[in-house]
Image (cartoon, rainbow, N blue to C red):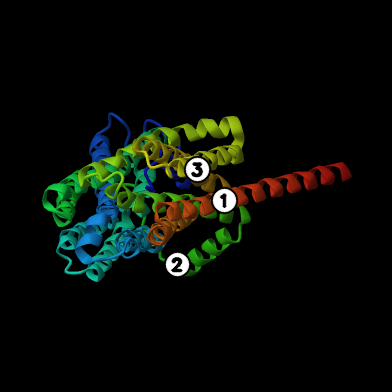
Amino acid sequence: MPSASTKAAATRAVADASPAPRADATDSRLAPGRPGYRRMSLALFAAGVATFALLYSTQALLPAVSAEFGATASAASWTVSAATGALALCVLPLSALSERFGRRSMMTASLAVAVAVGLLVPLAPDLDWLVALRAVQGAALAGVPASAMAFLAEEVRPKALIAAIGLFVAGNSIGGMSGRIVTGWVAQLWGWRAGLAAVGLMAVVCAIAFRLLIPEARHFTPGTLNPRLLARTVRGHLADPLLVRLYAIGALFMTVFGAVYTVIGYRLVEAPFSLPQGVVGSIFLVYLVGTVSSAAAGRLVGRLGRRGALYLAVTTTAAGLLLSLADALPAVLAGLVLITAGFFAGHAVASSSVSRTAKTGRAQASALYQSVYYLGSSAGGTLGAVAFHAGGWAGTVVIGLVAVLGVVSITLYGTHSARVEARRERLATAAC
């Protein structure tokens, strides 16, 4: 997440929330029709737009960045990987800080730093400076997803929670998509630096709107920072085989997605397609397919089970990768549709399963998933670009297929483990 841009995030956040008191007439938390609810929803929508517009702002511009700095695709891809990697490393510690200093304060500070850096990014004199500024920006942005879900869980009535989180998730999706489209078209007219400046200004407007609209937190209770307790909780999650498999699945799916969408611009601006920058940016409208497939993931799990839904997701993703090898634009676009649908469905299944699996420390379990998810994005972007430099688009597809094979292997192992455990339980029951 994109991450972070599916309705699965809403399901996960509800499970991550601490047990809330029963909603009744005396419940002072926010709900539709009550004062402050609409302002809170719009504020978090704006925060989501700003966060994901900034996070992936250079992705559609990588060919132009390469051209200006004389950099390879793998070198330019670090402008994306540095941001997502820094976010991955900072999600867990910033989620802990938000427990002490407040969700509202953390989101405000994160957006302020991120948009300030966003105004400096277009001025980067060379690629090294651009990568460094993007890393700082990604680290700052980690405070938004680390705090927004917890803020909603504390301030919104349970029955209204999914709808409220859904609007925040929609902001994530629209921000990630619109940021790429805006940069693409502006860059086509005035250059990639102007494209980044346009996204920076858009993020400034969103950050100001967030600060003006977000209500005071009325149900937040400051906690104490306890690194030992946090470390113990994290170690417990990493010792759970099922959670580790789910983390790996999320990371591998994001490796595919990061590789494909980091490199696709290079392929489409070259022959035989030779598309202009604005059209390449508009390719990210395919993200809308992910909204549909992630919403359908719950129904897929109901019909096929978790592992069956994962098998369908990886099959769809693999089919899309293979179809994208064709040199016909309609085939490439169809391949992107299948890759996007498969990725979002697989991510939805894996991420929503994390909270159901974790018995304690669900917030930390979710933060760990986000960490490995964005690490997968960083790895995919870098590896996909290296493979593209070495072997063209076919090399990037190989990276994606290897990651898909990893998901299949993990899922098969999970199926085998579940059968062995079920057999042991039957034998134990028979022995009794």
Residue at the image point whose x is 66% and y is 51% from the top: 413
Residue at the image point whose x is 60% and y is 37% from the top: 308
The label on residue 226 is 2
Image quadrant in which you'd find residue 286: top left
Measuring from the top left, give residue 300's x and y in whole percent. Answer: 54, 32
Q: Mark 2 or mark 3, which is nearer the start of the sequence? A: 2
- Mark 2 and mark 1 in contact? Answer it, CB < 8 Å: no
Where disc 1 sits, the SS reads helix
The label on residue 405 is 1
Where disc 2 sits, the SS reads loop
Q: Mark 3 or mark 1, which is nearer the start of the sequence? A: 3
Residue type indicated by callout 1: Leu
The quadrant of the picture occupied by the C terminus is top right
Q: Is 189 above or below relative to 69?
A: above
From the image, tell me which residue sits under label 3: 346
Alpha carbon distance from label 3 to label 2: 34 Å
Where disc 3 sits, the SS reads helix
Which circle, 1 or 3, is nearer the viewer?
1
Measuring from the top left, give residue 30's x and y in whole percent. Answer: 32, 37
Front residue of this view, candidates 131 and 208 = 131
Around disc 2, counting alpha carbons within 10 Å, would you say few (fewer than 14), some (14 to 19), or many (20 or more)? few
Which circle, 3 or 2, is nearer the viewer?
3
Front residue of this view, candidates 35 and 104 = 104
The answer to whether residue 247 is left or right of residue 416 is left
Residue type indicated by callout 2: Asn
Q: Is residue 282 visible from the viewing direction of this image?
A: yes
Residue type indicated by callout 3: Gly
In the orientation shown, which residue stands out farthest toward the left?
Answer: 190
Measuring from the top left, give residue 263's x and y in whole percent. Answer: 35, 53
